[in-house]
Image (spheres, helix red, strand yellow):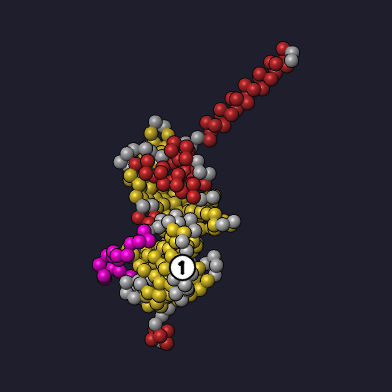
Amino acid sequence: MGRSTAMVVCSVLSALLAASGTMAGASEPTDPETVIRALVRANVEKDMATMSRLMAHDADITSFSVGGRKYVGWSEFEREMREEFASVQKFEIPIRELRVWHKGDIAWFTMELDYTRYVKEGPELKRMLLPLRETGVLERRNGQWVMLSFHESFRSAQMNGPLAQSSASPAQQLRVTNPPAAAMPDVSGDWDILEVEDEKRYKATLDKNGNGPYTQHQGRFVTTKIENRLWQGTWHQPGNDREGGFEVLLSEDGKEAKGIWWYTRVDTRKNIPPKEHGGTYYWKKIPPPSASAQ
């Protein structure tokens, strides 16, 4: 290689390095909205390093997710996200709506997104959705915006939208814990139930505590908790020797519910991780004969 050729190559390399440095700098989030979108993208890409860089690590910061999950400090959130990344094959998280406000070094936002998980079940991928609403606060520290805390919930107003999934409740818990009876939804009566992916339909007949049989493999539902329209419980099917849990969100009028179900045991296989194998539910309450006749 001649001297002139080497100089040209060095000049080209220098230009490329300078350009890459400029592009890297440009890709760093510089405003609250960009940080929020970068965090959603990091979730999709299972990029824990980016999430760590763009979220505050204060030990006393508290955040809440669906199903009553609570995170205090970065470590608890990181541990659960690593478990989520390990159990999910891929994510799709389209942002439906995002609004951001900021004043000085503080910013706050509201966001609606479809948290979509693809979990491997045998040779196939099963698609599960959480239609979420999220609020949160960011702070600018040393020129960089970071997420302080967030609060997630189901988009309860979208009961005709995508089906929801959230965390599991313990399958062995049999005691019903509810707010005062006046505030508890009336779930007694007959329900039409649809397992959406397999298009299986059957009927459940429940008492005032949300317990009762359903017409699928001699099945029986046991409610463990109803609070703020979040209905949790277990199901048992002696007919095919399987059992698991469920979690659905009741509509405001208490006549519909949407959510998920999962396995905890299949024959002799026990301790199946919640949320990994199951599907989505749609429940519709059947009016009593006197009401339907009017």
- Please tell me which residue is depicted at 66% across the width and 18% down the height of the picture: 10
162, above or below 188, in the image: above
| Quarter of the image with the C terminus in it | bottom left
Please tell me how crowded label 1 is: few (under 14), some (14-19), or many (20+) other residues with Cα within 10 Å.
some
Please tell me which residue lies in front, 250 or 48. 48
Asked if residue 182 is among those painted magenta in the image, a careful observer would answer yes
Instruction: Please give the range of residues in magenta.
Output: 170-185
Q: What kind of secondary structure does the magenta stretch mostly adopt?
A: loop
Can residue 94 be seen here? The reply is: no
Residue that protrudes farthest toward the left in the picture: 180
User: Is residue 18 found left or right of 46 in the rendered image?
Assistant: right
46, above or below 249, in the image: above
Tag 1: residue type? Asp
- Please tell me which residue is depicted at 39% across the width and 65% down the height of the picture: 234
Residue 273 locus on image (x, y percent)? 44, 55
Please tell me which residue lies in front, 215 or 282. 215
Secondary structure, mark 1, is loop
- Please tell me which residue is depicted at 54% across the width and 70% down the height of the picture: 199
- Please tell me which residue is depicted at 51% across the width and 73% down the height of the picture: 201
Can residue 123 be seen here? The reply is: yes
Q: Which residue is mark 1?
A: 241
